[in-house]
Amino acid sequence: MPLVTSTEMFKKAYEGGYAIGAFNVNNMEIVQGITEACKEEKAPVILQVSKGARAYANHTYLVKLVEAAVIECPEIPIVLHLDHGPDFETCKSCIDGGFTSVMIDASSKPFEENIEITKKVVEYAHDHGVVVEAELGTLAGVEDDVKVSAADSSYTRPEEVEEFVSKTGCDSLAIAIGTSHGAYKFTPDQCTRNEKGILVPPPLRFDVLEEVSKRLPGFPIVLHGSSSVPQEYVKMVNEHGGKMPDAVGIPEEQLRKAATLSVCKINIDSDLRLTMTGTIRQFFDEHPDKFDPREYLKPARANIKETVRHKLVDVLGCAGKA
């Protein structure tokens, strides 16, 4: 099966009450871990590449890694998506370079300018058979080159979504309902502590999501900044030389609820980075004489696979939907 767009994926996800996992990829082991889990669980998947990943690994290398995954996993639909495209030129480069989906993120711009930039990308993408994700509302946090302070973040205004989608022609819409980029999504004073002393972030604004869904019936909604920051890997990092106090993510039960509504795509990145980093730190602590990358990347890849499997089955609900 060649690379596909997300159009049919999202239609089935919306009707079926589940979401597609969109996993950020940066190297071979991450691509392998994700797609092996999806192959075994028979789950569709979106492999997404950020501007930072393209700068790190090179556009061509990343495309070829994803093409290799398509060959190795012919049973599952795979989308190659640009995450947080900052401008028309970056989106055009990815469209021309083999991506089947792009995101134009002009959410930091004034409403009318966001529409203008997004519409330009949509027109070019649709002429080339590529779909477009846009964003309305601004998430706090840090992800690659996306850096937004809590003071500058803003929830999506439901009263704007119909005009935005109508004027831009975008195929899906990322909204802000309280998720946040990075592993440090919330400060401790934004959270409460449960009976085990674990930080619990404020709940997502499901009222905003439900109002957006009413105004855009049947339209696929996207959640960014939705990593759960698995505490077992935060602990692993900290026990093996790291310092990640108070790293906290979005509770998985809230993501599962969002997936049963109109959210068809949930972005997951920090979970996989934490999984890889924690595993490698533990490996070197336990095997200080080792130096072969194949030896420490092998268990990292295996744990990424299990993290993704858990997300597919227990959070996204997309296992068996390929």
Image (cartoon, rainbow, N blue to C red):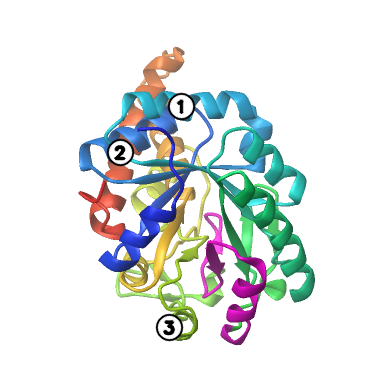
Residue extent of the magenta highlight: 158-184
Q: Secondary structure at mark 3?
A: helix
Q: Quadrant of residue 195?
A: bottom left
Q: At 26% across and 36% down in the image, what residue appears?
A: 39
Q: At 64% across and 80% down in the image, what residue appears?
A: 163
Give 209 or 163, whichever is nearer the viewer: 163
Residue 139 visible: no
Q: Quadrant of residue 18?
A: bottom left
Q: Residues within 10 Å of mark 2 (few under 14, many from 20)?
A: many
The verdict on residue 174 being magenta is yes
The residues bearing labels 1 and 2 have C-alpha atoms spaced at a distance of 13 Å
Q: At 43% across and 58% down in the image, what residue appears?
A: 266
Give 165 or 27, whichever is nearer the viewer: 165
Mark 3: which amino acid?
A: Glu
Q: Which residue is mark 2?
A: 76
Q: Residues within 10 Å of mark 3 (few under 14, many from 20)?
A: some
Q: Which residue is mark 3?
A: 210
Q: Which residue is mark 1?
A: 67
x and y percentages locating residue 186 in the rendered image: 54, 67
Give 319 or 180, whichever is nearer the viewer: 319
Q: Secondary structure at mark 1?
A: helix
x and y percentages locating residue 278 in the rendered image: 42, 38
Q: Which mark lies nearer to you, 2 or 3?
A: 2
The verdict on residue 278 being magenta is no
